[in-house]
Amino acid sequence: MAEPIARTDVAASANPTTTAMRELEPSAKPRAVRRPRGILVPLWLGYVFLYLPILIVVIMSFNDSENLFVWRGFSLRWYPEVFADGALMQGLGNTLIVATGATAIATVLGTLLAYGIQHYTRGGFVRAFAIAPAILPDLLLGIGLLTLFSLLGITLGLHSVILAHGVFATAFVTAIVLARMASLDPSLEEASRDLGAGPVRTFVRVTLPQLAPGIVAGALLAFTLSLDEFVIAFFTTAPTQPTLPIVIYSMVRFGVTPEVNALATLLLFVSVVTVIAAQRLTRLTGSSK
């Protein structure tokens, strides 16, 4: 007499694939990949090489001694002296004028350029051509703009630096606004036009509010880049109207003073805060969808 067959054996014989998959389940689990012990050493060495000099400048800006290599105690004495230096304050004023003007030009032109590229062009040639000033060497861009100003008979001054900084800052604003526009829903503009709104009203009422985080982020980045830029300003400014980086360069040729350390720390603080704000605004691209 034949023995009764168990239900599990019947199910297994009816579906042999299930049995095979169960046998493979333990071996199918991913194994933890061991990271080599020394793989992060070059990374941390690179960080030390890049940021250790900056950290030393920040620390020595609070040094009470006039000797940069001798720590005499913590003090804030050099920060008031920065604001009492006439040459530094003149350079700071010129730099703020240039950065504000260049940011305004770059923000308007970059936003309009990004809108035109997104809606009225096909292919990547125009897009690459618009962003090219961001990757060109500053030396090449500075010499080219100096040659252009000379051919057009434009005298050098703060106005020429504003135009020059506006050229390369426009490329950065264009790239950021284009990245923002890639996340927008085109059906909103289509619905606005279907309801009778013209292109200008659609842009002002529908597109521009959605682009606001990207525009502000691009403007902050343009302001920071113009604030710290040296090479292009060196070629396009007048000797009587130097920007702050040029003033600092003229001072450090004869040795770094504690005032320069304090000023560099202030500029570093402004740059870091501005870049963090731009990064936070750029993150709104994904969170607002």
Image: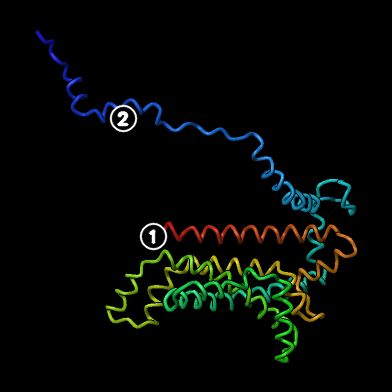
Between circles 2 and 1, the one closer to the viewer is 2
Measuring from the top left, give residue 41's x and y in whole percent: 68, 40
- In terms of depth relative to the viewer, which is nearer, 180 or 215? 180
Question: Tag 1 or tag 2, which sits nearer the N-term?
Answer: 2
Q: In the shown orientation, is residue 9 left or right of residue 233?
A: left
Residue at the front extreme, as displayed: 1
Secondary structure of residue under mark 1: loop
Q: Amino acid at mark 2?
A: Met
Per the image, the residue denoted by label 1 is: 289
Q: Residues within 10 Å of mark 1 (few under 14, many from 20)?
A: few
Q: Quadrant of residue 135?
A: bottom right
Q: Amino acid at mark 1?
A: Lys
Per the image, the residue denoted by label 2 is: 21
User: Which residue does the image show at 38% across and 81% down from the upper left?
Assistant: 201
Q: In the shown orientation, is residue 73 left or right of residue 41?
A: right
- In terms of depth relative to the viewer, which is nearer, 51 or 257? 51
- In terms of depth relative to the viewer, which is nearer, 16 or 102? 16
Measuring from the top left, give residue 207's x and y in whole percent: 40, 73
